[in-house]
Image: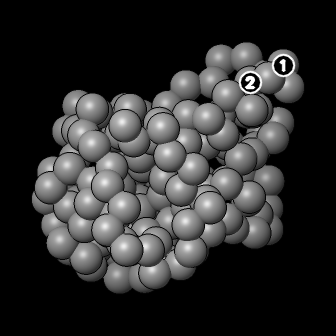
Amino acid sequence: MAKVTSVNISQEKGMIKQPIPLGYFKENHGLMGDAHAGDWHRQVSLLGRESIDKIAALGVEGLCPGKFAENLTTEGIELYKYSVGTRLRIGETIMEVSQIGKKCHNKCAVFEQVGVCAMPKEGVFAKVIKGGYIRPGDEIEVLT
């Protein structure tokens, strides 16, 4: 079963996010209180635990949810293999994949602290189509 293992938030862009027990994801906005939320195509970032484990296998220690500035840490699904436009039911929400990976123009705080980043190739970004709450343990269902 694909599921959320952590919901993460930060008040500044490019910073490591901190896990929270419950997040409200507002339609056409993103995670309330998060620096990346707003009226644009990268409202929510997602990264699989499997991608984090690949970096850990390189010998990087101290990796934890939110370390790559992802809002949702997932498990049991390789979201980066789905195409833009794929819709997902996550907790009470419906999200639409809007971008796979991203170009890192500057060495952000994540890269400076970790030394490598998974987001450029395996990070997924989504828009919130239907708002609602998400908590660790919520199932992820591919709708389209």
Where is residue 119 shown, x and y percent of the image?
A: 67, 54
Q: Position of residue 23 (x, y in %)?
A: 22, 46
Work out whether residue 75 or residue 108 is closer to the camera in this orientation and state it. Answer: 75
**Residue type at mark 1?**
Gly
Task: Locate the N terminus by quadrant.
Answer: top left
Which colour assignment does the render follow?
one colour
- Residue type marked 2: Ala
Q: Is residue 110 above or below residue 63?
A: below
For mark 1, does the 10 Å Cα neighbourhood hold few (<14), some (14 to 19), or many (20 or more) residues?
Answer: few
Relative depth, front residue between 81 and 68: 81
Q: Residue at x 73, y 59 (%)?
A: 120
Residue in the image at 84% along x and 19% along y: 59
Q: Which residue is mark 2?
A: 56
Labels 1 and 2 touching (C-beta < 8 A): yes
> Which element carries disc 1, helix, strand or loop?
loop
Mark 1 sits on what residue?
59
State the image quarter where residue 136 is shown: top left
The quarter in which the C terminus is drawn is bottom left
Q: What percent of the width, then of the height, locates residue 137?
A: 27, 32
Residue 30 as seen in the image, left or right of residue 48: left
In the displayed structure, does residue 76 sit left or right of residue 27?
A: right
Q: CA distance from mark 1 to mark 2?
A: 5 Å
Q: Is residue 22 visible?
A: yes
Asked if residue 16 shows in the view, the reply is no
> Which residue does the image show at 17% across and 66% down from the upper left?
131
- Residue 95 vs 22, above or below: the answer is below
